[in-house]
């Protein structure tokens, strides 16, 4: 008889969005845009932004506390904290370290994974490896970003899109056939400048000129990102399903990265999934980068949309370009 396979399972989920809301009508007063244009072209109605004086890890802490409560896991029992983010509290050290201290997770090793909007899928893939290999029994996987801190409020092509949020899952080990069935990750670095923040790194350190030229804010070729996102997310979703040995008809719910309703519609149509099986919450939050999937996952679970035995497909695409998918059985 073959030994049952050890897998990582999601024991609990949590999320946090900051209290401050910016509506499309608020943005109409800042740049030349309209609620109608933003709604029709993106599906976004409002987004939440982190209040001044708070950092990404403050938001992530709230999400993690909820995930740990939900999982009934004490922070002291965590072996690993893996945080998908590109907007840490500091350039270094990692926000996962800040989080570890806030949570009092004294035993855990912690680090950030920088994969922008695919940050959560990448962090989940890493956490899954640690748990599956037996190097960790309990891992906290976080997706948290505060991209409002990097927006150019003169650029209507980007400032309308992003919001701040945090989401987290607690991974444990199981041998009952449930858990993370597959993860697939891809990147193509030839597209780095399609979506990036030009200054503030080692290539172009901060100086008065970079600040004057708005080079510390997001620059994006939206049309190009859009086109490649749909194609890539479809392809990698099919690969993740193949690896898991699951057909698209067996998937109860698709939780895609929340960047644009038109991207999600096109992806669902290409995958042949009816929209009733697709989670969309970007109307409330905009694109929250690494947080979008764990926030949507947490909301879906708490709304009773995920039941034991359900198979969920997660997929994301973003800067790098970096994209990925995961198939999870609850
Ligand atoms: O997380 C992953 C990363 N990001 C994404 O996935 C974003 C992917 N891209 C998109 O979501 C879309 O490309 C956008 C929402 C960013 C833009 O929508 P689009 O349909 O691709 O518009 P466009 O950039 O082709 O612009 C069409 C027109 C242009 O005017 P002209 O040249 O036709 O006169 C833009 O200047 O719309 C104009 N425009 C706007 N008008 C009103 C661009 N942004 C705005 C705006 N309000 N906010």
Image (cartoon, rainbow, N blue to C red):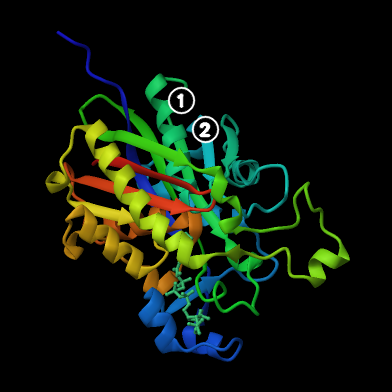
* Residue of label 2: 80
Q: Name the residue at 45% across, 26% down.
A: 130
Res 136 label: 1
- Name the secondary structure under disc 2: strand
Residue 97 visible somewhere in the drawing = yes
Q: Give left or right: position of 195 versus 296.
A: right
CA neighbours of label 1 inside 10 A, class few (<14), some (14 to 19), many (20+)? many
Quadrant housing the C terminus: top left
Q: Give left or right: position of 322 versus 243.
A: right
Q: Is residue 22 above or below residue 182?
A: below
Q: Give left or right: position of 2 versus 100.
A: left
Q: Is residue 223 above or below residue 293?
A: below
Q: Is mark 2 within 8 Å of ligand 1?
A: no
- Name the secondary structure under disc 1: loop
Q: What count of labels does the image hold?
A: 2
Quadrant housing the N terminus: top left
Q: Name the residue at 49% across, 89% down.
A: 25
Mark 2 and 1 residues: CB-CB less than 8 Å, in contact? Answer: yes
Q: Where is residue 133? Give x, y as percent.
A: 41, 20
Q: Name the residue at 37% across, 32% down.
A: 172
Q: Give left or right: position of 207 versus 219.
A: right
Which of the two residues, 52 or 121, is positioned nearer the viewer here? Answer: 121
Which of the two residues, 48 or 114, is positioned nearer the viewer here? Answer: 114
């Amino acid at each position: 008889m073959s030994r049952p396979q050890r897998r990582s399972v999601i024991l609990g989920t949590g999320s946090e969005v900051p209290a401050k809301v910016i509506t499309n009508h608020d943005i109409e007063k800042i740049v030349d845009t309209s609620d109608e244009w933003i709604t029709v072209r993106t599906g976004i109605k409002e987004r939440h932004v982190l209040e001044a004086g708070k950092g990404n890890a403050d938001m992530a802490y709230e999400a993690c506390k909820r995930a740990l409560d939900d999982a009934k896991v004490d922070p002291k029992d965590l072996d690993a904290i893996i945080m998908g983010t590109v907007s840490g509290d500091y350039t270094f050290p990692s926000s996962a370290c800040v989080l570890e201290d806030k949570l009092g997770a004294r035993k855990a090793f912690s680090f950030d994974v920088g994969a922008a909007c695919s940050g959560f899928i990448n962090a989940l893939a890493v956490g899954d490896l640690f748990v599956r290999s037996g190097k960790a029994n309990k891992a906290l996987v976080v997706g948290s970003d505060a991209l409002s801190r990097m927006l150019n409020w003169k650029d209507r092509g980007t400032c309308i899109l992003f919001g701040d949020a945090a989401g987290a899952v607690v991974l444990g080990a199981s041998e009952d056939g449930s858990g993370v069935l597959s993860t697939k990750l891809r990147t193509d670095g030839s597209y780095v400048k399609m979506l990036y923040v030009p200054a503030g790194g080692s290539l172009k350190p901060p100086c008065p000129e970079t600040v004057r030229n708005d080079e510390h804010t997001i620059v994006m070729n939206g049309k190009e990102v859009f086109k490649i996102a749909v194609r890539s997310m479809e392809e990698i979703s099919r690969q993740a399903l193949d690896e898991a040995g699951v057909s698209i008809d067996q998937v109860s719910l698709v939780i895609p990265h929340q960047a644009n309703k038109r991207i999600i519609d096109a992806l669902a149509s290409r995958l042949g999934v009816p929209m009733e099986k697709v989670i969309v919450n970007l109307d409330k939050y905009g694109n929250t980068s690494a947080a979008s999937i764990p926030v949507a996952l947490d909301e879906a679970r708490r709304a009773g949309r995920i039941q034991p035995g359900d198979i969920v497909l997660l997929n994301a695409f973003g800067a790098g370009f970096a994209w990925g998918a995961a198939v999870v059985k609850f």
